[in-house]
Image (cartoon, grey):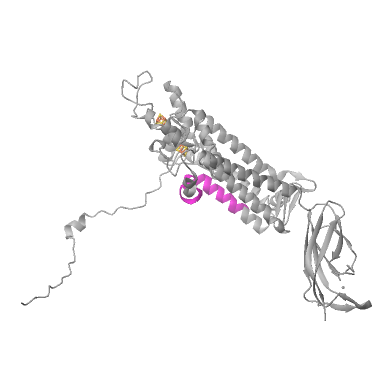
């Protein structure tokens, strides 16, 4: 029996020309639509403005506060010292900076777990400056509908002067912000004098302009784009949410079906929910989303939609809270406010609070008992052990004593570890700022561990630094 091998054939599908011609090119990039947030007033809006005032009072005001002969808060990078009121921190105090960052991160975790993006909605500089810039915009160009109308119109004298005035005010705020920022690193009064004399250093000019234009660009133009596309926090926030986290939520059960109706109409008779579909919650949203579609990553939790919806509910004579801060579990189980709060303080929150509290207390205690000077002991490797007059053996060390207070301090140096060991230079020294002193010493051939003890004579403090003493064979 003969068998024939089955020939294999390649099949290449070809789309008929007429089908190819029908193909439509779909762009994956949507053109950016400008958002014109409507101004809103209400409980959450008042809170946000309260935080705006507080944070900006601190930010703009703090560099002008004096502490003794210097600026109260100054990060002097040139001399590598950070002054925070009475505290002087050196690079060796890096641990405190780490502690502060850990506290900031834990606080963020805690607040996010309790009430979602509280930081984003109320205290983030992007939100705060956007709020200030929007306020200026409203003063110069009117509220949402006036701004939209004017932008759609052609050039006119009215449009040009209003826009020019708005940008001029934005630039003043932005450059003042940049100047203030630099004032945390260079004494702000000197900076002000240099500015008036047109004599600012090149780095100071650069950072003032850089920070100023970043503020102008981010708060004036980028706005919600920063939150949606640039800020990493928006990406990982959902990892910190759970079903007991307070988030801004639309009560679909109560609000749907949506529909317009007169104030006097009975929604039940019309088979309508409480939402009158006025779209005000979308118009006030700084990121332009519709909260009625559920939780979206663009939502910064500002509560503007809750505020405006409450005013709508008031006008309609309905109960407030169609859009409100609540938790997923509270919505599902129809919990009362008291039940909701009981569940918010869940074990996770208590653990975060306990850890945060412990770190804060540890930081405060550590700062309170901190020795107000630093010592580095370095064996001088350029000079080996040598025999000097009287048969004594001398080792040379460099002691760097850094005075972390703002007054002249006196210190006594002693050394232990070998019989007859002594400091041959003077054993007390005065330090105004970072200084180095050489001390020398003497025993059996080899390497001997020794300890330098540096005792402050003016403030409480006693530091011990270890080193070795070499004796030649
Ligand atoms: S503001 Fe309230 S009533 Fe108006 S559309 Fe939004 S959810 Fe509905
Ligand atoms: S949906 Fe509401 S809470 Fe979220 S960003 Fe918009 S206005 Fe703010």
In the image, is residue 17 part of the stretch drawn in magenta? no
Q: Nearer the viewer, residue 260 or 60?
A: 260
**Image coordinates for residue 104, horizontal then vertical, percent:** 60, 47
| Front one among 155 and 335 | 335
Dominant secondary structure (helix, strand or loop) of the stretch shown in magenta: helix
How many numbered markers are drawn? 0
Quadrant of the snapshot with the C terminus: bottom right
Examine the rendered structure and indicate whether residue 440 appears above or below residue 183. below
Relative image position of residue 333 (x, y in whole percent): 42, 32
User: 465 or 139, which lies in front?
Assistant: 465
Q: Quadrant of ligand 1?
A: top left
- Judged left or right of residue 212, residue 90 is right
The residue lying furthest to the left in this view is: 1
Q: Is residue 228 magenta?
A: yes
Which residue appears at 86% of the width and 63% of the height? 414
Horizontal and vertical percent position of residue 64? 71, 44
Question: Quadrant of the rendered structure where residue 94 is?
Answer: bottom right
Residue at far right of view = 390
Residue occupying image coordinates x 59% and y 49%: 212
- In magenta, the rendered stretch is 208-233
Residue 292 vertical position relative to residue 452 in the rendered view, above or below: above
| One can see residue 124 in this view | no
Q: In the displayed structure, does residue 31 sit left or right of residue 76?
A: left
Along the horizontal axis of the image, is 461 left or right of 317? right
């Amino acid at each position: 029996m003969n068998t024939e091998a089955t020939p294999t054939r390649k099949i290449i599908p070809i789309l008929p020309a007429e089908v190819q011609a029908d193909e439509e090119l779909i762009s994956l990039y949507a053109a950016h639509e400008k958002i014109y947030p409507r101004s809103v007033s209400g409980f959450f809006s008042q809170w946000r403005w309260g935080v705006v005032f507080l944070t900006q009072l601190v930010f703009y005001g703090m560099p002008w506060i004096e502490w003794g002969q210097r600026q109260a808060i100054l990060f002097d990078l040139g001399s590598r010292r950070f002054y925070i009121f009475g505290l002087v921190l050196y690079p060796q105090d890096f641990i405190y900076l780490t502690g502060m960052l850990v506290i900031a991160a834990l606080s963020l975790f805690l607040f996010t777990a309790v009430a979602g993006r509280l930081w984003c909605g109320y205290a983030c500089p992007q939100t705060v400056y956007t709020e200030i810039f929007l306020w200026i915009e409203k003063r110069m160009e009117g509220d949402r509908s006036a701004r939209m109308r004017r932008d759609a119109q052609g050039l006119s004298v009215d449009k040009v002067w209003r826009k020019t005035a708005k940008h001029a005010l934005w630039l003043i705020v932005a450059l003042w912000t940049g100047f203030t920022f630099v004032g945390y690193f260079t004494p702000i009064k000197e900076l002000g004098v240099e500015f008036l004399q047109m004599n600012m250093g090149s780095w100071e000019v650069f950072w003032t302009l850089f920070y100023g234009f970043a503020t102008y660009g981010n708060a004036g133009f980028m706005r919600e784009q920063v939150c949606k596309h640039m800020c990493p926090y928006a990406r990982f926030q959902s990892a910190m949410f759970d079903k007991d986290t307070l988030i801004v939520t639309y009560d679909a059960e109560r609000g749907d079906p949506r529909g317009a109706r007169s104030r006097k109409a009975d929604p039940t008779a019309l088979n309508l929910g409480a939402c009158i579909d006025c779209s005000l919650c979308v118009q006030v949203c700084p990121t332009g989303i519709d909260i009625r579609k559920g939780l979206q990553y663009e939502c910064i939790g500002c509560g503007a939609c809750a505020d405006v919806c409450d005013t709508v509910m008031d006008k309609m004579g309905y109960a407030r809270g169609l859009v409100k801060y609540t938790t997923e579990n509270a919505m599902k189980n129809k919990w009362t406010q008291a039940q909701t709060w009981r569940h918010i303080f869940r074990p996770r929150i208590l653990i975060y609070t306990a850890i945060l509290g412990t770190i804060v207390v540890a930081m405060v205690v550590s700062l309170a008992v901190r020795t107000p000077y630093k010592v580095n002991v370095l064996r001088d490797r350029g000079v080996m052990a040598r025999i000097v007059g009287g048969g004594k053996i001398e080792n040379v060390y460099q002691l760097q004593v850094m005075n972390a207070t703002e007054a002249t301090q006196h210190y006594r140096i002693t050394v232990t570890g070998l019989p007859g060991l002594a400091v041959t230079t003077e054993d007390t020294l005065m330090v105004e700022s970072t200084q180095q002193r050489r001390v020398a010493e003497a025993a059996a051939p080899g390497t001997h561990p020794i300890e330098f003890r540096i005792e402050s004579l003016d403030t409480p403090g006693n530091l011990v630094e270890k080193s070795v003493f070499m004796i030649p064979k």
